[in-house]
Amino acid sequence: MLTAQKIKITSNDKAYSINLPKDFNLNLNEEFYVNKIGDVVMMTPAARLADTLEQGAKILSEFAPDFMSDSLPESIEAAREEL
């Protein structure tokens, strides 16, 4: 498993460029989807997107139905400010 590595990001007027270390072993002929969630940027091979989403759904399904229920307010509506 790879450990986190620092990389450089450069940009021009139209796009960003990211130089990934060679030990990431990416197929240069493969297309990728890129997503940004908060501060996290993820690349997923386009050919395996369905598999990746299925794996994510499987992981989420393993959480108990009441996961984190004790950390949520009793009523989210009650916590909202009146308009």
Image (tube, grey):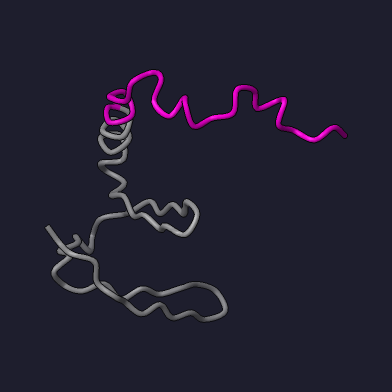
Residue at the outermost top position? 65
Please provide percent x and percent y for residue 26. 19, 62
Magenta highlight on residue 42:
no
Q: Nearer the viewer, residue 25 or 1?
A: 1
Q: Nearer the viewer, residue 8 or 65?
A: 65
Magenta highlight on residue 62:
yes
Please provide percent x and percent y for residue 79. 71, 31
The quarter of the rendered structure image containing the C terminus is top right
- Residue 31: quadrant of the picture: bottom left
As drawn, is 2 to the left or to the right of 69? left
As drawn, is 4 to the left or to the right of 40? left
Magenta residues, start to end: 58-83
Number of labelled discs?
0
Residue drawn at x 31%, y 34% as measured from the top left: 56
Above or below: residue 44 compared with residue 56: below
As drawn, is 18 to the left or to the right of 81? left
The quarter of the rendered structure image containing the N terminus is bottom left
Residue drawn at x 31%, y 50% as measured from the top left: 44
Please provide percent x and percent y for residue 72. 54, 30
As drawn, is 29 to the left or to the right of 81? left
Residue drawn at x 59%, y 28% as measured from the top left: 73
- Residue 63: quadrant of the picture: top left
Residue drawn at x 40%, y 54% as measured from the top left: 34
Above or below: residue 74 compared with residue 4: above
Above or below: residue 23 compared with residue 59: below
Please provide percent x and percent y for residue 13. 57, 79
